[in-house]
Image: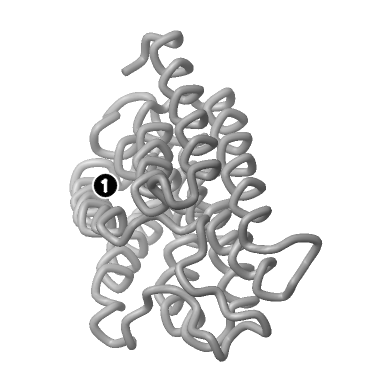
Amino acid sequence: MEKFTAAAILVLSIAFAISPAFTAPFSGFTPDQLPNPQIDPPIQPEGYAFAIWGLIYTWLIVSAVLGLWKRADAGDWHAARLPLAISLAVGVPWLAIANASAIWATITIIIMALGAITALIRAPYVDRWWFQAPVGIYAGWLTAASWVSIGTTAAGYGLITGSFGWAFAGILGALSSALAVYKMRAAPEYLLTIIWALVGIVVANGVVTLPVSAFAAFGIAVLAFTLIRSQRI
């Protein structure tokens, strides 16, 4: 069973990495997907920040190859593989889902994030750079992306407040989630990735939407302080 799961992780990691080649590009929800179109929502990081997917795809595949080759029967690796497999399996069709429905995109990316976070919490303490690091970066980006999707979709449906209010709510949600997960598993890679996303929000908003930039900068400071204090960088 362990070897089968290890092989499945490799297949899913490769499928996840090549899935964008078979799907229409996705750069945010289109105007026709939401009752109140969200054009450049303030919760969304600047475009360059999404380049982190290249690192995520590559490192997950390298991790899966080593896992099948060297750690196929390792119990500590196996404990984290099932939630990771669930996350990757949902991730393979995610771009197609996102291009079809904002609501289902939000639901499924939350499932992906929960699977990745569970895998991170269960990650082996040995082989840090081969499992914790790639999964931590993956989980961190999905945590941030989930709140971006929640904020954009909620604003698009006019729930409670508009895009400005949901930008604050999304940043607060990402910050709270990050601190909660880090308390369960002190993986610096996870927090550093969320810092990367918050920097992207600062860059995207600049001085035009200064309150959002300032709040994102506050989140960066809190996470950086947490990393320094834990002395685990």
Q: Exactly how many numbered labels are in the figure? A: 1
- Identity of the residue furthest to the front in this view: 208
Q: Quadrant of residue 35?
A: bottom right
Q: Position of residue 226 (x, y in %)?
A: 48, 17
For the C terminus, the image quarter is top left
Is 175 above or below relative to 45? above
Left or right, 87 with respect to 45, comes to right
Left or right, 192 with respect to 176, comes to left
Q: Nearer the viewer, residue 165 or 89?
A: 165
**Residue at 39% across, 36% down:** 195
**Residue at 63% across, 34% down:** 176
The residue wearing badge 1 is: 67
**Residue at 44% across, 11% down:** 230
Q: For the residue marked with disc 1, what is the amino acid?
A: Gly
Q: Position of residue 228 (x, y in %)?
A: 39, 12
**Residue at 37% across, 78% down:** 26
Q: Position of residue 74 (x, y in %)?
A: 35, 38
Q: Position of residue 117 (x, y in %)?
A: 52, 44
SS of the residue at dot 1? helix
Q: Nearer the viewer, residue 109 or 135?
A: 109
Left or right, 132 with respect to 117, comes to left
Q: Nearer the viewer, residue 42 or 81?
A: 42
Task: Indicate the colouring scheme.
Answer: one colour
Is 70 above or below relative to 187? below
Q: Nearer the viewer, residue 211 or 16?
A: 211
Badge 1 local density, few (<14 within 10 Å), some, or many (20+)? many
For the N terminus, the image quarter is bottom left
